[in-house]
Amino acid sequence: MVAFRRRRFADLPDWPAADHTLALAAFRRGAGQFLSNAVRTGTLGIDAAAFRAAAEASLAAQPGDGTAQSFFEQHFVPLQIVPDTVAGPDGEHGFVTGYYEPVVDASPVETPDFRFPLYAPPPELVKVDDVSRPPGMDPSFRFARRKACGLLEEHPDRAAIEAGLLRGRGLEIAWLADPVEAFFIHIQGSARLRMTDGSQLRVGFAAKSGHPFTAIGRLLVDSGELTLAEADMDGIRAWLAAHPDRQRALFDRNRSFIFFREAAVDDPALGPVGAAQVPLTALASIAVDRELATFGVPYFIAASQLAIDGRPFRRLMVAQDTGSAILGPARADIYVGSGLEAGKIAGRIRHAADFTVLVPAALAESLAR
């Protein structure tokens, strides 16, 4: 269960410094989705149709003219999200992690140096829902494999695919030099590839095998290989480098396998296109639970123990992506940016946070207690 508690903007810690300009730019990028009725309302009941007026007004606003804060204050009411769970040590009811866009070298063809492929979805992989999902298949599966007879079954998992199940079918988008980099691209869901011919290519999430995601950091903690403090991205990478003979077995325990689609690098300053079908904005876009949340909605996130740029994290952000491990009403993955430095920051984000969603006044009346 979840409740919405009405708040004032003055109640939000450091609200005047929440980087409204960046958030308004991100919100505007998704405005067209609201206006074309392309946004699905999540099960929390944050009605997408209620955002049409704010979306239209955002297209007339200029994010850099000093009016961004007043735009949000004029068009929205803050509602704190209060899940029916125990709050964190500072009263925070949610949790944030971070993700980024890896930037790696790649080849369009397999070579002795580039041997680890990223795959496009096979044609027999199909989406399923509660109506089309076969009896007995786990309700969490959103993809299945269509057999030659037309019946659906679970798609083979990571271990089978990595063992060569799809080789030779022309599904390879690009080849990487390092299996660790390939695995982390699967975790992040996108990457920017520096091709050997000098061009650049983006790959983004297209589909998955359907199997549940398993965090290898959690596996290493549970087995005593790493402490919880050590199980950030740097710690996991260090463990993998020290145990090359155990990498594959560990990777295969995450049965989920990601398939990608190609995209041009139209604007290197922006991130990849997220699940909301708009480019992500570093430190202004978040990934949310796609079943509960509504894409395009602004969130004020306050994490008292998370420091980025030397001060506590208190920023206004927009829900524009999703992820397999992002489950719950007060749960988000913060998009940090592209490249190695962004990855180092993202890999250390594992913090309790307070979530406040910004909704139009009429909607606030129906949601808040």
Image (tube, helix red, strand yellow):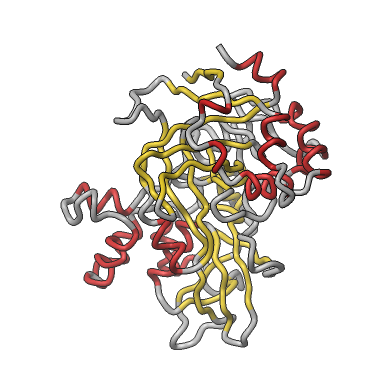
Q: Is residue 360 above or below residue 32?
A: above
Q: Where 263 falls versus 84 (above or below)?
A: below
Residue 164, x across and y down, in percent: 45, 69
Q: Residue at x 58, y 28 (%)?
A: 9
Residue furthest to the left: 224
Q: x and y percent of residue 48 in the render? A: 71, 30
Identity of the residue drawn at 57% across and 38% down: 290
In the foreground, 318 or 272: 318
For the point 61% across and 17% down, which residue is it? 367
The foreground one among 365 and 73 is 73
Frontmost residue, 78 versus 334: 78
Image position, residue 141 (x, y; %):
51, 40
Residue 60, compared with residue 341, is above or below; it is above
Residue at the (72%, 18%) spot, across then down: 362
- Res 297 → quadrant: top right
Instruction: Please state the horizontal and vertical placement of residue 308, each as a whole percent of the image.
Output: 42, 52
The reply, left or right, for residue 116 in relation to residue 288 is left
In what quadrant of the picture does the C terminus appear?
Answer: top right
User: In this orientation, does residue 143 appear?
Assistant: no
Snapshot quadrant of residue 245: bottom left
Task: Give left or right: position of 229 versus 302.
Answer: left
Front-lying residue, 278 or 109: 278
Is 42 placed left or right of 117 in the picture? right
